[in-house]
């Protein structure tokens, strides 16, 4: 459970760094207003707010997120969120019902685009 909580906190820090250091990421979030949460079935989680070109998060849940990602438990959430093959892990988790997504799927897809800025830059072959 602690690893899951730390991972969610760390996600905020990584996104903040991407916004501050990558002009394309800063442009991507500019003008966006979004509140979402990542949690477990047991109610452990964190909610995130993207507003005014930045992101912040708070431990605990909010009453009206635009979307929610709910993992079966903290161990599954940690494994899926920290997987090297993120997209495959998410799709597998949805298929196995280890992850449920509720809310505005357009916003979920927008968030998926934001997480692309967390990927290390690919080296170009010469």
Image: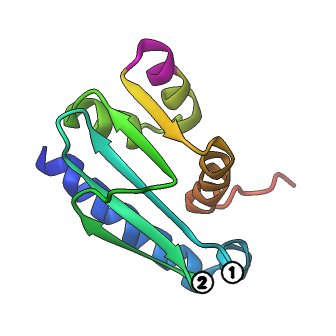
* Classed neighbour count for the residue bearing mark 1: other residues with Cα under 10 Å, few (<14), some (14–19), many (≥20): some
Q: In what element is the residue under mark 2?
A: loop
Q: Residue furthest left?
A: 2
Q: How many badges with numbers are in the image?
A: 2
**Residue 62, magenta (yes or no):** no
Q: Left or right: where does residue 100 sit relative to residue 44?
A: right
Image check: 45 left or right of 118? left
Task: Tell me the quadrant of the picture where the C terminus can be found.
Answer: bottom right
| Left or right relative to 41: residue 54 | right
Q: Which residues are magenta?
A: 92-97
Identity of the residue drawn at 18% across and 49% down: 3
Q: Nearer the viewer, residue 89 or 38?
A: 38
**CB within 8 Å, label 2 to label 1:** yes
How are the residues colored?
rainbow
Q: Which residue is mark 2?
A: 53
22 or 77, nearer to the observer: 77
Q: Position of residue 113 (x, y in %)?
A: 67, 54
Give x and y (percent) for residue 50: 52, 72
Q: Note whether 37 is above or below 15 in the view shown.
A: above
Residue occupying the point 44% across, 56% down: 65
Q: Which quadrant of the rendered structure holds the N terminus? A: top left
Residue 75 sits in quarter: top left
The secondary structure type at the circle numbered 1 is: loop
Q: Position of residue 23 (x, y in %)?
A: 71, 82
Q: Which residue is depicted at the point 49% across and 22% down?
A: 94
Q: Which residue is mark 1?
A: 30
Q: Is residue 33 above or below residue 109?
A: below
Which residue is pictured at 31% across the width and 59% down the height?
A: 62
Is residue 93 rendered magenta in the image? yes
Q: Residue furthest top?
A: 96
Q: Residues within 10 Å of mark 2 (few under 14, many from 20)?
A: some
Measured from the top left, where is residue 47 in percent x and y? Answer: 35, 61
């Amino acid at each position: 459970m602690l690893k899951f909580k730390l991972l969610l906190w760390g996600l905020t820090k990584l996104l903040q760094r991407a916004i501050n250091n990558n002009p394309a990421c800063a442009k991507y979030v500019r003008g966006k207003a979004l509140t979402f949460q990542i949690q477990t079935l047991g109610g452990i989680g964190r909610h995130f707010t993207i507003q005014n070109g930045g992101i912040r998060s708070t431990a605990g849940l909010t009453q009206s997120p635009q979307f929610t990602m709910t993992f079966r438990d903290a161990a599954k959430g940690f494994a899926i969120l920290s997987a090297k093959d993120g997209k495959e892990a998410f799709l597998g988790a949805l298929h196995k019902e280890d992850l449920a997504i509720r809310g505005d799927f357009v916003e979920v897809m927008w968030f998926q685009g934001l997480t692309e800025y967390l990927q290390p830059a690919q080296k170009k072959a010469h």
